[in-house]
Image (spheres, grey):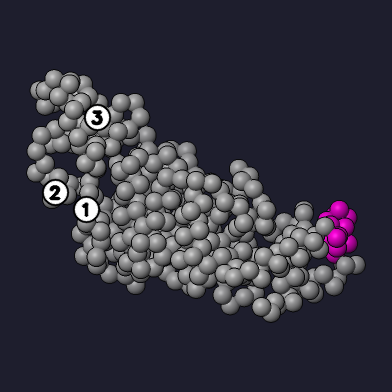
Amino acid sequence: MSVDPGLASWLRLTLTPGLGASTLRKLLGQFGLPQAVLDRRRELSALLPSAVIHALYSTQVEEAVGAALRWLGEPGNALITLADESYPRGLLEIADPPALLYARGRTELLRRDCLAVVGSRNGTVQGEENAQRFARALSDAGLTIVSGLAMGIDAAAHRGGLAGASSTIAVLGTGIDIAYPKRNGDLAAQIAARGLLISEFPLGTGPVAANFPRRNRLISGLAQGCLVVEAAPASGSLITARAAAEQGREVFAIPGSIHSPLAKGCHALIKSGAKLVESAEDVLAELSGFRRSGFASTTLGTSPASAGAPGLLAHMGHDPVDVDLLCARAGLPAEQVASELLRLELEGKIAALPGGLYQRLEKTAPPR
């Protein structure tokens, strides 16, 4: 494939240690395109530390540029700069847009209407089911699902997006060539094949803690709104939600049990003005250009199949419960309750949670 020679200049600037994104944008504003910046070495010497000047023209950076261009030559890979027409419009609206994006997969998804769906890495079984169900319905309604490829809610949202018509975008907190977390390696491969992976970080960048909160501004920036499914009071998901609010995006939150620590973050968002949602239609009704679509299967609550469920299931409610409480509610001995719980778990109607708790699962037909 032919490579735009200007890309090497973009890469050199973005791969130079010590040359931050803010400084880079100022240089571009002052001198023009990257090659014009590089041609002004004398002027740069008066503006940048000598160590940065030395790195900018070093063999080490030149080798990194060559590695990135070789990566670009592989099928499905792309580099998108601030000057490209294909650069996501939503990111141009945020305070700190990356100068360069590494992409693998369907770059046309960056021009689609998107919704961020985020939540806890340690989501409950019910929370992950809600995330996947909402994401699929919203994907079928025309919204590409954006998330961060973390375990738990993020992964469930990506799976739902892939199952729907509008696919999914994963924004990485590592280099695009790094599989993290490793347990999501297969999911990342599916997204690369049928959706899109993007990262602002150079190839080979490992999982540095500070990079994940930074990546969250891109998740919200790409989207019209942000849906938080489950979140603890101090979590990365709330960082994404705050970024979305600061960027003028809609913020949505799914309520949960008052006894669940993972519902407290969502409840805090609702108290501060986020829109409480119980169905995909609640999200669609708030976003311009979308109409209610009748996806009744995304509604939270009791499904017709479980509403009349006989036996122990009828005594479980929707909050996690332990065996002793179920014995008291049902008036049954512990042995009988334990046997019934095992049967319901094998049938996929309940899930066993940490701490000896059990929770009913709401199974519904896939959205149509």
The quadrant in which residue 359 appears is top left
Q: Are marks 1 and 2 in contact (CB under 8 Å)?
A: yes
- Comes first in the chain, label 2 or label 3: 2
- Comes first in the chain, label 1 or label 3: 3
**Region rendered in magenta:** 44-59
Q: Secondary structure beneath disc 2?
A: helix
- The numbered disc on residue 305 is 2
Comparing 195 with 261, the one in front is 195
Q: Is residue 223 left or right of residue 209?
A: left
Residue at figure coordinates x 47%, y 60% from the top left? 190
Instruction: Name the spot of residue 342 as percent of width and height, x first.
Output: 22, 32
Instruction: Name the spot of residue 169 as percent of width and height, x first.
Output: 48, 62
Residue at the extreme right of the image, as rendered: 42
Comparing 13 with 286, the one in front is 13
Q: Are marks 1 and 3 in contact (CB under 8 Å)?
A: no
- The numbered disc on residue 364 is 1
The quadrant in which residue 67 appears is bottom right
Q: Is residue 297 left or right of residue 289?
A: left
The quadrant in which residue 297 appears is bottom left
The amino acid sitting under disc 3 is Val
Instruction: Name the spot of residue 36 as percent of width and height, x first.
Output: 80, 74
Residue at figure coordinates x 20%, y 26% from the top left? 338
- Observer-side mark, 1 or 3, equals 1
The amino acid sitting under disc 2 is Ala
Neighbour tally class for label 1: few under 14, some 14-19, many 20 plus, Cα within 10 Å: some
Neighbour tally class for label 2: few under 14, some 14-19, many 20 plus, Cα within 10 Å: few
Q: Is residue 53 magenta?
A: yes
The residue under label 3 is 321
